[in-house]
Image (cartoon, helix red, strand yellow):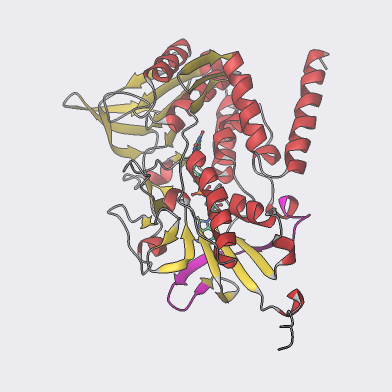
């Protein structure tokens, strides 16, 4: 019998891998997959789809408010990030996915068929109260610009005090309170409203204590066990200790709660009660082995039976697992379960101050701020972007040192 002739790679049918969402889950999956050894020899095409033209590196979003970082550093465009890769980027909004026919419906480009699909579209702001048109949210670069503009107008119009009310005592609310406190200095009158008994409820006692201390130092008034009834023009109506109170305020920032996008809730697969899709430990959907779902839109139970938190840390680690498993699936190898390693927690508490708790070690103050920034710069996407940020930071540091 003659030797079986190998089909040259250029005649293999193209495997189309579509990735929806260019955040911590999606963009990093695309980059890991693209950098996988042997990927370039396979006849694969990666298409990354996002409604925005840039990623938002959310852990460093607060630094834009205080001018510690520029927006290009924490929200680089996909075009810039992907310029030296073969990953194709489509700026478009996904309206739906038909899992049965393997088709994505895009707002502008129509239908797109895939062989493999990665879904990582995150979540959106939670349900907002009556009068929500007067409040600001803090999730995107546009939100940061709105807040920045509003602060600037108030700073220039010279009221004696600038009153800011932040709703939600989770990490976003606490980090915003610290940064805005430092930006406004003595002119700031900041109140943090939390429905529960404590701020930062899922954090370690050490981080909570450091946060409390930092907010006290900035005269942030913390109202615990307080809920918001309604929002009107320049006031917020709260319910506290069995009574209603009206708080006059110039800015209301809403950071409480998140929700899953409607089209994700309606996908033809298993969901939990919040509407998150349920992924198996390999990050595949139960009836659709060609579909991987990760990040905030997904419920994944870790081997100890705990549901993983909706954090960048989880999505980032899942991205590497998803990339390896897609590669294994293409090459007919065994897929591996996702194992989460909790590396600790880091939050900013003002300009050049932070709190870190990792593997039993707690750190706070300016050293923690330097470590936190270093860790996050190392996590930014692509080598060339990291390099550009490091060079820029060094230039700024030298300029400040020379007092110019
Ligand atoms: C202000 C802030 C600070 C945070 N700080 C931290 C922190 O310090 N540490 C931490 O671990 N976590 C932090 N988080 C949480 C973290 O950002 C999320 O857990 C993480 O981004 C989840 O990654 P993801 O890939 O699931 O979604 P995302 O990173 O949110 O990415 C989703 C992407 O999908 C795109 N998208 C959504 N819908 C569509 C659609 N229909 N069509 C096309 N594209 C779509 C979006 O534009 C977005 O780019 C923070 C969150 C916020 C809001």
Front residue (pair 178, 123):
123
**On screen, residue 369 above or below 106:** above
53 to the left or right of 276 = right
- Which quadrant: the N terminus? bottom right
Residue 257 located within the stretch drawn in magenta: no
- Quadrant assignment for the C terminus: top right
User: Does the magenta segment cover residue 102?
Assistant: yes
368 over 29 or under it: above or below: above
Residue farthest toward the front in the current orientation of the protein: 1
Q: Which residues are magenta?
A: 81-104
- Evaluate whether residue 160 shows in this view: no
Say above or below: 198 vs 39: above
Where is residue 115 shown, x and y percent of the image?
Answer: 56, 72
Residue 227 screen position, x and y as percent: 27, 33
Q: Position of residue 208 (x, y in %)?
A: 39, 19
Left or right: where does residue 114 sit relative to residue 222? right
């Amino acid at each position: 019998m003659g030797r079986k002739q190998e089909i040259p790679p250029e005649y293999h049918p193209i495997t189309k891998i579509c990735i929806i969402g260019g955040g911590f889950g999606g963009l990093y999956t695309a980059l890991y997959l693209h950098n996988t050894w042997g990927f370039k020899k396979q006849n694969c095409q990666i298409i990354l789809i996002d409604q925005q033209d840039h990623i938002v590196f959310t852990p460093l979003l607060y630094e834009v408010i205080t001018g510690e970082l520029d927006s290009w550093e924490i929200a680089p465009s996909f075009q810039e990030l992907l310029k030296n890769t073969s990953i194709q980027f489509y700026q478009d909004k996904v309206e739906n996915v038909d899992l049965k026919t393997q088709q994505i419906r895009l707002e502008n480009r129509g239908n797109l068929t895939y062989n493999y699909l990665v879904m990582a579209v995150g979540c959106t702001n939670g349900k907002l109260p009556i009068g929500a048109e007067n409040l600001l949210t803090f999730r995107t670069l546009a939100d940061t610009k709105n807040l920045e503009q509003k602060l600037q107008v108030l700073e220039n119009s010279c009221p004696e005090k600038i009153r800011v009310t932040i709703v939600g005592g989770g990490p976003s609310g606490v980090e915003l309170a610290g940064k805005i406190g430092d930006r406004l200095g003595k002119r700031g009158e900041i109140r943090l409203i939390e429905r529960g008994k404590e701020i930062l409820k899922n954090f370690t006692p050490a981080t909570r204590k450091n946060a409390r201390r930092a907010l006290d130092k900035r005269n942030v008034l913390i109202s615990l066990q307080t809920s918001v009834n309604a929002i009107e023009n320049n006031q917020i109506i709260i319910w506290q200790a069995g009574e209603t109170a009206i708080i006059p305020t110039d800015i209301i920032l809403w950071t409480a709660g998140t929700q899953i996008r409607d089209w994700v809730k309606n996908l033809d697969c298993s969901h939990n009660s919040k509407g998150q899709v349920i992924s198996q430990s390999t990050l595949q959907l139960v009836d659709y082995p060609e579909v991987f779902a990760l990040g905030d839109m997904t419920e994944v139970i870790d081997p100890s039976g705990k549901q993983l938190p909706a954090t960048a840390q989880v999505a980032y680690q899942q991205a590497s697992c998803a990339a390896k498993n897609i590669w294994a699936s293409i090459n007919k190898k065994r897929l591996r379960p996702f194992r989460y390693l909790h590396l600790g927690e880091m939050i900013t508490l003002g300009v050049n101050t932070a709190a870190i708790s990792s593997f039993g070690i707690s750190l706070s103050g300016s050293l923690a701020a330097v470590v936190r920034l270093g860790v996050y710069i190392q996590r930014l996407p692509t080598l060339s972007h990291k390099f550009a940020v490091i060079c820029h930071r060094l230039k700024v540091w030298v300029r400040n040192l020379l007092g110019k």
